[in-house]
Amino acid sequence: MAGPLSEDLRWRVVRAVEEEGMSRHAAAARFGVGVSSAIRWVSAWRLKGTVAAARMGRPSPPKLTPHRETVLALLEANPDCTIEGLRHDLAERGIVVGYGSIRRFFEREGITRKKRR
């Protein structure tokens, strides 16, 4: 994860190229970074106006979104079921998901699992 120090380094490389007229190769050597990094940072500055690191990876869509109605129907039929119980019921229907996927589904839907007396 990029922190303030790495972003500061990017800024120093970009300033050396843009304000001091230094080549990207020379700026890379001056600050001890790879030439390809210096080229990328200056290009990002010129195209996007930022030197901040881009997010890594692509978030996958939630696995239970296409099965929303099935999950809600199972919860309506058995409102006191546990997450593990719900996982088992979904697996019987061919929907294999992890505990975290169900927990995140509950968060998105505003479903709480508090025990009721």
Image: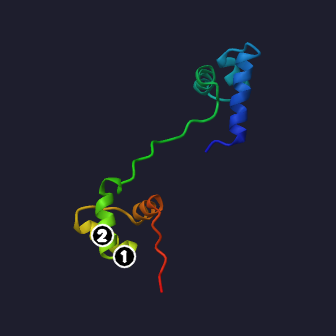
Q: Is 22 positioned to the left or the right of 86 in the image?
A: right
* Circle 2 crowding by C-alpha within 10 Å: few under 14, some 14–19, many from 20: some
Q: Which quadrant does the N terminus fall into?
A: top right
Which residue does the numbered mark 2 point to in the structure image?
74
Percent of width and height locating residue 79: 36, 76
Tell me the quarter of the picture where residue 93 sits. Answer: bottom left
Q: Does residue 31 appear in this view?
A: no
Q: How is the image coloured?
A: rainbow
Q: In what element is the residue under mark 1?
A: loop
Q: Residue at x 66, y 29 (%)?
A: 33
In the rendered image, the residue lying farthest to the right is: 20
Q: Amino acid at mark 1?
A: Pro
Instruction: Pick whichever, 97 or 65, lies toward us.
Output: 65
Tell me the quarter of the picture where residue 70 sits. Answer: bottom left
Q: Is residue 101 above or below residue 1?
A: below
Percent of width and height locating residue 111: 45, 66
In the rendered image, the residue lying farthest to the left is: 93
Percent of width and height locating residue 28: 67, 24
Q: In what element is the residue under mark 2?
A: helix
Q: Amino acid at mark 2?
A: Leu
Query: Which mark, by number, is residue 79?
Result: 1
Q: Residue at x 34, y 75 (%)?
A: 85
Q: Earlier in the sequence, mark 2 or mark 1?
A: 2
